[in-house]
Amino acid sequence: MSPTDPVPVCGRFAPSPSGRMHLGNLFCAFLAWLCARSENGRFVLRIEDLDTSRCRRSYAQLLEDDLRHLGLDWDEGGSAGGENEPYFQSECGSLYAQALAVLRTKAHVYPCFCSRADLHAASAPHRSDGTVLYGGRCRSLSPQQAAALSDQRRPALRIEVPDAVYGFTDAHLGTYRQNLARDCGDFILRRSDGVFAYQLAVVVDDARMGVTQVVRGEDLLSSTPRQIYLQTLLGLRTPEYVHIPLLVNEQGVRLSKREKSLDAGALFARFTPEDLTGWLAFLAGQLPRPEPCTPQELCKVFRRENIPSHHIIVPDALLT
Ligand code: GLU
């Protein structure tokens, strides 16, 4: 391949198996698959089971069955494995530890002893999404102070962020920027229970799996500048990002994951895979009305620019 050849597309779906998939997960998988396959790209299934207290292998198995039932396939990942093993984040601890070691040489990574209550008590401003901006309480602890505190509590690890703007052009939503210090704050790389943070894991895995295209829900848009910051420090390529709008009901309320009628089991009991695909294609702006079809058929007519750019209203007919 010459340096001017375009890099072949590699997309991915990266679910957390903490329960049965719901309509929103299926919608995301469907669009990620269509974006990659319509460009003749590879498709990877990565299981984001970092939090082993919430995730289960049985849910991972079920989600593979559900994806297949819908007619979606993948070239590597999940239980099928492939050349970029491991595909389960719970097995990637040493890879994340290596990345953490590199980050320590490039930025200020420090132990943070704050409890949840401390974080809320600190008079730090709140981000617009309701999460607390870290006020920097542990940022300048001396090694002696940190050692003394370590006797009482295991620290999380945070990375200091610069007072600088990190932005990108989302292929669907356009320009998005954050001043990391002001809008995000120092963020966690490893939790106090030793579990590596999503922000670090996702960056390491997307890079090592050769992912060039990340299609995921708009709720992760505000995580992306942090991920780009880590990519910059680690010398990794930034993939193309496509954040897709969230699904809401007719009242404009985001669909709840806990809504039983929306989990894959309930949906597959009510709809054939072709009927459900027709609904997903309709919601994704690919069909004027829900009509039975297969993902393979849609691939030929898929137009990314037709995906709506605002919240997508799921009609009550699909919900009840
Ligand atoms: N594991 C995340 C989730 O299930 C998705 C992460 C990503 O796509 O970057 O919400």
Image: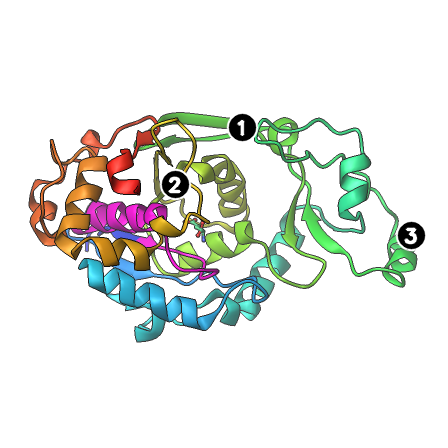
Q: Quick one: which residue is furthest to the front in this view? A: 320
The answer to whether the residue bearing label 2 lies less than 8 angstroms from the nearest atom of ligand 1 is yes
Q: CA distance from mark 3 to mark 1?
A: 32 Å
Residue 206 placement (x, y as % from top left): 40, 55
Element at label 3 = helix
Image quadrant of residue 63? bottom left
**Marker disc for residue 217:** 2
- Quadrant of image for the C terminus: top left
Nearer the observer, 319 or 176: 319
Q: CA distance from mark 1 to mark 2?
A: 18 Å
Q: Which residue is mark 3?
A: 145
Q: CA distance from mark 2 to mark 3?
A: 41 Å
Q: Which dot, 1 or 2, sits closer to the camera?
A: 2
Q: Does 25 lie within the magenta span?
A: yes
Q: Which dot, 2 or 3, sits closer to the camera?
A: 2
Q: Residue at x 14, y 49 (%)?
A: 275
Q: Which residue is mark 1?
A: 178
Residue 128 placement (x, y as % from top left): 58, 26
Residue 117 placement (x, y as % from top left): 79, 43
Indicate the amino acid at tag 3: Gln
Element at label 1 = strand
Nearer the observer, 172 or 274: 274
**Which is nearer the N-term, disc 3 or disc 1?**
3
Q: Which residues are magenta?
A: 12-38
